[in-house]
Image: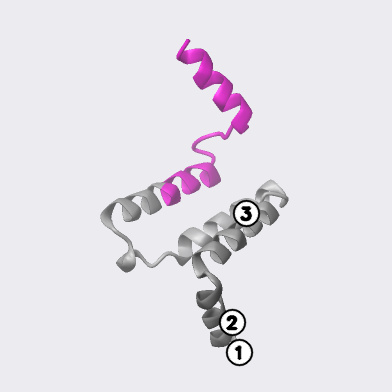
């Protein structure tokens, strides 16, 4: 059954449907509480197969894991996105 669905996507424009599906998933994920979004991000990063990634992607994946671990250990403190953007904008003025 799953294979038939994928075949149907190919026939009707897989990339367009996939983009819509990803957008829908992102919209749903953004409604989750912060902790749940962090868990989802963690699961997605862990699901990446390093063997299939290019060098740059592997480096970004390692960086994401390193930063996650720093936050979890209390080594660094997070700030809200709006505050971070405000600080960046002020620093370039």
Q: Among all residues in the image, which is located at the extreme top? A: 93
Label 1 Cα neighbours within 10 Å, binned few <14 / some 14-19 / many ≥20: few
- Measuring 45% from the left and 14% from the top, which residue is drawn there? 92
Residue at (60% x, 56% y) in the render: 39
- From the viewer's perspective, is the residue at label 3 or at label 2 nearer? 2
Which quarter of the image is occupied by the N terminus? bottom right
Dot 2, how many residues are within 10 Å of its Cα: few (below 14), some (14-19), or many (20+)? few
- The mark closer to the camera, 1 or 3, is 1
Residue for badge 2: 5
Name the element at disc 2. helix
Q: Nearer the viewer, residue 19 or 93?
A: 19
Is residue 71 in the magenta section?
yes
C-alpha gap between disc 3 and disc 2: 21 Å
Count of number-bearing discs: 3
**Residue 69: x and y, percent?**
48, 48
Secondary structure of the residue carrying tag 3 is helix
- The residue labelled by disc 3 is 26
Asked if the residues shown at circle 3 and circle 2 are in contact, with their CB atoms under 8 angstroms apart, the answer is no
Rendered residue at 47%/66% (across/down): 47
Picture coordinates of residue 68 (x, y %)? Answer: 49, 47
Q: Position of residue 26 (x, y in %)?
A: 62, 54
Q: Could you say which is closer to the camera, residue 43 or residue 30?
A: 30
- Identify the image quadrant of residue 80: top right
The residue singled out by tag 1 in the image is: 1
| Magenta extent | 64-93
Do callouts 2 and 1 mark residues in contact (Cβ within 8 Å)?
A: yes
């Amino acid at each position: 059954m799953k294979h038939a669905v994928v075949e149907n996507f190919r026939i009707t424009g897989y990339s367009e449907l996939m983009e819509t599906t990803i957008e829908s998933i992102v919209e749903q994920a953004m409604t989750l509480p912060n902790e749940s979004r962090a868990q989802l991000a963690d699961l997605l990063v862990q699901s990446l197969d390093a063997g299939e990634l290019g060098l740059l992607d592997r480096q970004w994946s390692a960086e994401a894991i390193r930063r996650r671990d720093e936050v979890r250990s209390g080594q660094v403190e997070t700030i809200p996105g709006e505050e971070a953007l405000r600080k960046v904008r002020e620093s370039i003025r």
